[in-house]
Amino acid sequence: MNISVIGAGVAGLCVATELASRGASIQLFDTHGEIAAHACSWWAGGMLAPFCESETAPEIVTRLGQASADWWAAQGVNVTRNGSLIVALGRDTRELDQFARRTTDHAMLNEEQLGALEPDLQGRFSRALYFANEAHLAPREALQVLTRNLKSHGVEVQTTPAVAAATTIDCRGLSARDALKDLRGVKGEMLLLKCADINLSRPIRLVHPRIPIYLVPRGDGVFMLGATQIESADRTRATVRSILELLSAAYALHPAFGEAEILEIGVDARPAFPNNVPRIIRRENTIYANGLFRHGFLLAPALARQVAALAIDGGKPELMHENHS
Amino acid sequence: MAKFYGIELNSPLMLGTSQYPSPAILEEAFKRSGASVATVSLRREAGNSKMGGDFWALIQSLNVKVLPNTAGCYSIKEAVTTAQMARELFNTSWIKLEVIGHSDTLQPDPFQLVEAARILVDDGFKVFPYTTEDVVVAERLLRAGCEVLMPWGAPIGTGLGLTNIYGLRTLRAQFPDVPMVIDAGIGLPSHASMAMEMGFDAVLINTAVAKAGDPPAMAEAFAKAIAAGRLARNADPMEPRDMASASTPVIGKAFLS
C-alpha cells in the first residue's frame, strides 16, 4: 500500500512509524525538512502525564494517554518513569486538594516523603501530590529517534512538494488551517534553563491561581520551564509578561533558579480543535490527523495507531470526527 | 429590569470568557447559563496582532452582547489605549474599565479609575467601571459620566462572596436608580442569589464557572440562583423580626394524643 504522510512533527513521525511497522510503503514530506525549531513539538514539555491532565482534560485523553510511555519506550526512546509531583505555595494549598479531587491515581505526600523523592525540595513544601505512574521524555531526542528509525526503514523526510498517493495523511498541524476550519492556535511560551544547583528526578507542577507552571528535568542541570496557554495563533515572539511570570513562578518554586542560565526562550502555537481533543477526519483519499493541543507526546501514539488502522484496514476509529466542514 | 446605557438585557447574568478548559466547554457553559453578556479580555489574547481571531469568532458565535474589559491595566494610559483597541475590534462602545492599583489583591485604583472614566466618557465610551463598594468613589464615577457601576463582592478570582454586606447595602441605598453589577469575588450561586436579593441588577461571573469541575453545570446553577434571587427581590421579602411568631396559631388547637 502506497501512502504519503505530510508533516514530520510529532504527529507525522508517529503516524509514519506506525504505518512502517505495518509494512506500508510510505513517503514522508515536510517542506521544512527534518524535525527542528519550525515544529511546535520541538518546544514541547515531554510529560507523559495522563492522570495529571485529567484535571481539565476529558476522559479520553487520560485513557488513550496511558499507553504512550510504553509506545515511546518500544521505539527506543529513553523514557523516565519516575512519576510526577504537584506542589502549591503556602497560601494556595487548597488548590492542591482541588487538584487531588479532580484526578486519580495519586498519593498525598508529607514533607518527609517529598524530601525522600526530591531532596532539593525538602522543607520547601509541607505536602505534595505524587502521581507514581507517570513518565517523561526529552522531546527533541524522541523525535530524532523516530526520524532515525524511519531512515533505517528507507523513509527519508522529503522537502519537495508532496506527491499524491493512493492515500495521503495530512499531519501538518496548524498549517492545515487552510483545510480544517475548526482548527485554532493556542500560543505557548517556554524556557530552557540551566541550573547546576538543583537536581530533580521528575516533572514538578506548581499549581497557582494565576500562573500554573511545570518544570521538566532534561538531565545535566537543564530544565524545561513551561508553559503559557493563550488563545492566539501568534507564534512569532514571547512577551515580557509571560516570561516574567514563568520565571517568577520558577523562582518561587526554588530560589536557586534565580541563578539559572537562560538557554532558550521558545514560542509556538499548538493546533487544537474546539474541545481540545485530537481528531481524525477523512475526505476522499486524504486523512487528516490533527489537533493534539498540549498533548502531542501523550496522544500522538494513540492517534497514529488509529490513523494507521483506518488507512490500512478501514473502519471507524474512536478519534474519527465526521460532518467536518 | 434595569437598563444598561439604554439596553435591556434578557438575563442579569454576565459571564467571563477566560480560563475554561476548552472553547467547546465555554460554549456549553454559555448555553446553559443563558447569559446575556460575555466579557472578554483584550490584552492577553490579542497581543499586538489579530492572531486571536479564532477566539473572537467563537465569542461572536455565542450571540450575546460583548463587554470588552481592560483587565490587567495598571495605568490610565494603558486602560484608555486598551479601551480604544477594544472599540475597534468589537465594534462596541461598551467597556468594562479596570484600573488595578495593587498587584496582590488586584484592588482597583480609585484615583486613576475616576480619571480614566472621565477620559473615556468624553471619548464617547459607555463605561462600566470596576470599583469597590466605596460610596465616595461611586459618586465621583457617576459625576465623571458613568451610568453604571460595577462594585466588587470580593477581590477578583477569590470566590469569597460578598465580603462587605454593609458597604454594598449602603451603596445600593445611596444610588437606588443607578444600574449596578456585582463584579468579582463571587464563588457560589448562593452569593449571586444574595446579590440579587439585595437589589443589585446583575452579576458578573468568570472564575467560579470556568474553574469549576463541571463548568456548564455550574453555569446553570448560577442561572437558577440568580433567577431565584431576582424573583425573591421582586416578591418583596419580609423584614427580619426579633419576636418569634408562629405561622400557625396554637391557641385553641384541639389537644390530641
Image: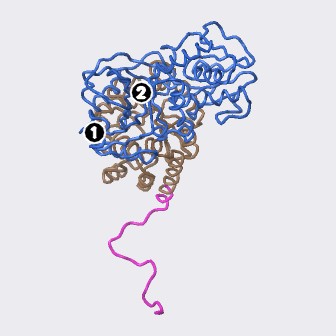
Mark sitting on residue A39? none
Q: Position of residue A322 (x, y in %)?
A: 70, 33
Q: What is the spatial separation of the Cα atoms under label 1 and label 2, in whole angstroms?
A: 25 Å
Q: In which quarter of the image is the N terminus of chain A?
A: top right
Q: Position of residue A83 (x, y in %)?
A: 41, 36
Residue situated in front as seen by the camera: A261 or B114? A261
Q: Where is residue B250 in the image (x, y as percent from the top left)?
A: 43, 86
Residue situated in front as seen by the camera: B229 or A26? A26
Magenta span: B230-257
**In the drawing, does residue B134 fall left or right of residue A158?**
left
What residue is shown with label 1? A115
**10 Å crowding of disc 2: few (<14), some (14-19), many (20+):** many
Chain that the image shows in brown: B
Mark sitting on residue A227? 2
Chain A shade in the render: blue
**10 Å crowding of disc 1: few (<14), some (14-19), many (20+):** some
Q: Position of residue A46 (x, y in %)?
A: 46, 27
Say which chain tag 2 marks: A
Q: What residue type is labelled 2?
A: Ala
